[in-house]
Image (cartoon, rainbow, N blue to C red):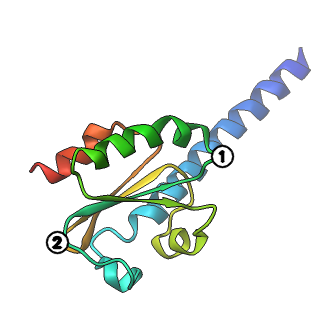
Amino acid sequence: MKILYIGAAVIAALFVLKIILQIIVVKKAKKNVGAKLSDLLPDFRGKDFFLYLYSPTCTPCVRLTPKIKDLISKGVKGRMIDLSQNIEIAKKLGIMATPSVVIVKDGYVKDVLMGLINPEDIEKYFNQ
């Protein structure tokens, strides 16, 4: 019975640790909200677009990538960045998890969306 209690305590501690790590990852990614994108990434200029940061080995990315391609084909300005080939971009933006989407409005980082998001959430930023 004692082993069950220890096991439950370990599982609870791991769950709390996971939540703390997720909070850290989100806070780091959101620290650039309000920053001028060209200051962070001089090669990226423009007013209204999004950056989709993904990895081809990430399961949620594999599900989301076709939907992002469809969104771009519908005319929403976006750029797909494979972080397995461009890790420096992720470092400069503070992105530690994929998939992530950086929304840029008027040249400034407006928001960072993380995880398996709905592409309509991206589109709404450009229809406001």
Q: Name the one closer to the observer, 25 or 83.
A: 83
Q: Name the one closer to the observer, 16 or 23.
A: 23
- Name the residue located 35 percent from the left edge and 77 percent from the top edge: 44
Helix, strand or loop status at disc 2: loop
Answer few, some or many: residues within 10 Å of disc 2's Cα (few below 14, many 20 plus, some between 14 and 19).
few
Q: Say left or right for 80 vs 90.
A: left
- Name the residue located 41 percent from the left edge and 80 percent from the top edge: 41
- The furthest residue to the left: 128
What residue is shown with label 1? 57
- The furthest residue to the front: 73
Q: Position of residue 76 (x, y in %)?
A: 23, 52
Helix, strand or loop status at disc 1: loop
User: For residue 46, what is the image quadrant?
Assistant: bottom left
Answer few, some or many: residues within 10 Å of disc 1's Cα (few below 14, many 20 plus, some between 14 and 19).
few
Q: Say left or right for 2 vs 26.
A: right
User: For residue 83, what is the image quadrant?
Assistant: bottom right
N-terminal-most mark, 2 or 1:
1
- Name the residue located 45 percent from the left edge and 63 percent from the top edge: 29
What residue is shown with label 2? 106
Amino acid on which the number 2 mark rests in the picture: Asp
Q: What quarter of the picture does the N terminus occupy?
A: top right
User: For residue 79, what is the image quadrant?
Assistant: bottom left
Q: Position of residue 9 (x, y in %)?
A: 76, 31
Q: Position of residue 69 (x, y in %)?
A: 38, 45
- The furthest residue to the top: 1
2 vs 1, front mark: 1
Q: CA distance from mark 2 to mark 1?
A: 32 Å
Amino acid on which the number 1 mark rests in the picture: Thr
Q: Say left or right for 4 vs 103.
A: right
Q: Name the one closer to the observer, 33 or 52.
A: 52
